[in-house]
Image (cartoon, grey):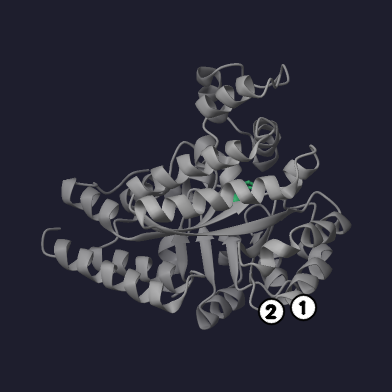
Amino acid sequence: MAKYECNEHMENFLRELPKCEHHVHLEGTLEPSLLFNLAKRNNITLPSHFPPSVEACAVRYNNFADLQDFLDHYYIGMSVLITENDFYDLAMEYFKKAHSDGCLHSEVFFDPQGHVERGIHIDTVVEGFDRACKKANELFGTTNKLIMCLLRHLPAESGLKTIDDAHKHFESGVIHGMGLDSSEKPFPPHLFTECYKTLKDRFPQVGLTAHAGEEGDHTFVSNSLDLLTVSRIDHGVNSQHDEQLMTRLAQNQTMLSLCPLSNVKLQVVKDVSELPIDTFFNKNVPFSINSDDPAYFGGYILDNYRAVHTRFGFSTEQWRQIALNGINGSWCDEDRKTELRQLVHSIHNKYKDLI
Ligand code: HPA
Ligand code: ZN
């Protein structure tokens, strides 16, 4: 439970600390209010077992039994997204909120197969999201990158087709990377070796990541590194159970994109204090702190930072290191990284003697 206070100075420091988010699913930022508005706008009737109101969502979303129970709601939720404007509106809401939380660089996931299988063209999805990335950059000065995820509950052939469908968007640089999400345990990394190899052969510079070690054990993490050649890991909490893997992550500075409030809401742990965040820090395993599906898990990036602070009580110097690790693990260019690092140092200097 919460052991440390987040006093006013600390609260301001955490908000102003330049943050990078690497693990947020745009479809998971669909707040119930927007969900019901879009359902109305697009004449979509939600299934009768879906919570019928904003209030009912708040109750149901607070009681997910596990990852699959959440995903069953998440796929129904995204069914209200139809037009390019819907995708634009969804992403803009997220970028606005992230900016107000002091998040200056976001690398955001989306699930094209979840839309294409409902008859939505991939270009509709990508163009809506890309327009929002550019508008957010213009309005807020934030930098943003799109990462396409493959759904691991679908066959690798569907993944390969999605890679083909997205070809021109990788070529133009509008999609910057690829990840792997959805139900983890029944669908281990080796099933997607060919998908990752195909994309990497076509675009050697592409960023590669995968969800691993959220519900799956530590072998999901090492196999994602070995077979999928990913350069970072989404979640990865179960890496803690393999010392060799921990050493490997530290030596190669492979970043884990942790999602503390998600882990609580999906019953991975009972409380954020049970996560091995201090162990990762002390063993020099780099991590970033992220919101995953904030509309479903009740917290955006700053809420996650605050939850970590109240459990682990990191010093401003430790927070500076966490922020720098997030910049190092980002896929933005070196100039942007230099700019972000300078901002981190100046916010640290502003607060270090106050806290
Ligand atoms: N895990 C796996 N797949 C997902 C998640 C998650 O936390 N969120 C959206 N798709
Ligand atoms: Zn996720």
The residue at 36%/57% (across/down) is 141
Look at the numbered disc 2 and give the secondary structure of its residue: loop
Circle 2 sits on which residue?
204
Hey, what amino acid is under mark 2?
Pro
| Marks 2 and 1 close (CB-CB < 8 Å) | yes
Please give left or right for residue 154 compared with residue 145 in the image.
right
Look at the numbered disc 1 and give the secondary structure of its residue: helix
Please give left or right for residue 105 compared with residue 90 in the image.
left
- Quick one: label 2, few (<14), some, or many (20+) residues within 10 Å? few
For the N terminus, give its image quadrant: top left
C-alpha span from label 2 to label 1: 6 Å
Q: Identify the residue at the far left of this view.
A: 353
Q: Where is 84 relative to 38, above or below? A: below
Q: Which numbered marker is on residue 111? A: none
Q: Which numbered marker is on residue 201? A: 1
Depth check: give the residue in front, 81 or 229: 81
- Tell me which corner region of the image, top left, top right, bottom left or bottom right, holds residue 343: bottom left
User: In this view of the protein, can residue 267 be seen by the observer?
Assistant: no
For the C terminus, give its image quadrant: bottom left
Depth check: give the residue in front, 107 or 203: 203
- Tell me which corner region of the image, top left, top right, bottom left or bottom right, holds residue 242: bottom right
User: In this view of the protein, can residue 255 be seen by the observer?
Assistant: yes
Please give left or right for residue 299 compared with residue 102 in the image.
right
The residue at 28%/51% (across/down) is 15
Residue 156 coordinates in the image, percent (x, y): 85, 59
- Quick one: label 1, few (<14), some, or many (20+) residues within 10 Å? few
Mark 2 C-beta closer than 8 Å to ligand 2? no
Residue 348 coordinates in the image, percent (x, y): 21, 66
Hey, what amino acid is under mark 1?
Asp
